[in-house]
Amino acid sequence: MAGFTHLFIPGPTNIPEQVRQAMNLPMEDMRASTFPELTLGLFAGLKRVFKNESGRVFIYPSSGTGAWESAMTNTLSPGDRVLMSRFGQFSHLWVDMAERLGLEVDVIDTEWGTGVPVEIYAERLAADKEHRIKAVFCTHNETATGVTSDVAGVRKGLDAANHPALLFVDGVSSIGSIDFRQDEWGVDCAVSGSQKGFMLPAGLGFLSVSQKALEAAKTAKGRRCYFSFDDMIRNNDNGFFPYTPATQLLRGLRVSLDLIEAEGLEAIFARHHHLAEGVRKAVDAWGLKLCAKERKWHSDTVSAIHVPEGIDSAEVVKRAYHKYQTSLGVGLNKVAGKVFRIGHLGWLNEVMVCGALSAAEMALRDCGVKLAPGSGVGAALEHFRLAGPVAVAKA
Ligand code: PLP
């Protein structure tokens, strides 16, 4: 078929041409004395994106899931009690990993479409006078339901209870795209991956840790080898890795960090909000509902959209792909067949988002959803036209 196939799943995201070109280069020697000129700058640049001045960042040749495993095995011990909440496929997978790694998981199940129950966390922490809870987990942006949670609120609960538990955040679909402040929010382990806000292929797992997490790693008994902080630190301090790093991805990361710095994090967050608002206007105009139950949960990086009863959302996604060359995200787990997702994060602009909305609108009508042609796309166009330029002027 002619023309582009359009990618609007919530990761992997579209890769800027400069980033793609930067990865198209011959293999290089990862033990060359010049290699640290690349890597030391990457560690520093990632720390700026995570807003982590005091700690350090690890880059693993893995996806985000590897960075999760690293966070848990390096800082916790089997049998440690951890507080988690589950309200979507990714928060579910985090619980599953913690259980398989032998942690004692205290799970709070909340309705899909809501997020981290900050008040319940605060109560549990206040009640835990003996400090048996060793870590508290927060899925910042639940990609399956398009829900963003209040990390700062979780920190407030910890502080109010004067509780020493570590704070873990899954920022795979948020960091670099929406507001995240590791130092200010007292996050000890923040996890992300290369294929979303960082606009790269999958293949790098990022783990940004506080000094407190590094301290915890000295006594934690979790079994680790490939992901060991110690091995990484010994090598990373000189700009090297304990094993073969993914050199092309690292070259791409250099350019994606440059693009992020050039646009500015605050401008990127504003752009994502602006684009997400356009999608939400379209959803309203279609007469459909987001999976996210309330405005406070709305994600600026992904929208999960409910289809009406009797319609299979997987058919909508198939139709968009086969007939209109556009990838939308399917519903996962409990919301399979019920929602489809539009990823609106990474390297994209208003007209690209209108492409996703056009394909979704046509596919919805093809599948029998009663909506006026052009209604959603028209609402988004007007929003984009009137809400003005995306770019926030850089001071
Ligand atoms: N956490 C969230 C919120 C995600 O969206 C994803 C992937 O989509 C993951 C974790 C897993 O990350 P990865 O697929 O990079 O291992």
Image (cartoon, rainbow, N blue to C red):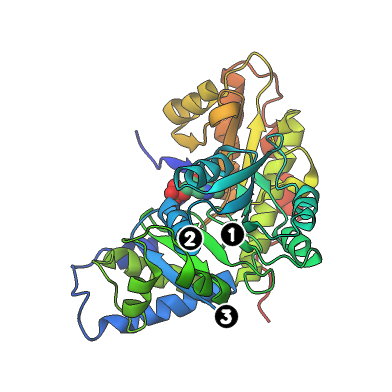
The residue at the point 41 percent across, 58 percent down is 200
Furthest residue toward top: 310
Name the spot of residue 68 as percent of width and height, x first: 47, 55
Q: Secondary structure at mark 1?
A: strand
Q: Position of residue 381 (x, y in %)?
A: 69, 45
Mark 1 crowd level (few <14, some 14–19, many ≥20, 10 Å Cα)? many
Q: Quadrant of the C terminus?
A: bottom right
The CA span between labels 1 and 3 is 17 Å
Name the front one of labels 1 and 3: 1
- Mark 2: secondary structure: helix
Label 1–label 2 contact, CB within 8 A: yes
- Callout in the foreground (3, 2): 2
Spatial distance from mark 3 to mark 2, Cα to Cα? 18 Å
State the residue at coordinates (25%, 67%). 243
Q: Amino acid under label 1?
A: Phe
For label 1, the residue is: 168
Residue 71, disc:
2
Whether residue 177 is situated above or below residue 110 in the rendered picture: below
85 relative position to 211: left or right: right
Which residue is denoted by mark 3 in the rendering? 53
Amino acid, disc 3: Glu
Separation (CA) of disc 1 from disc 2? 8 Å
Residue at (76, 37) in percent of width and height? 293
Q: Quadrant of residue 131?
A: bottom right
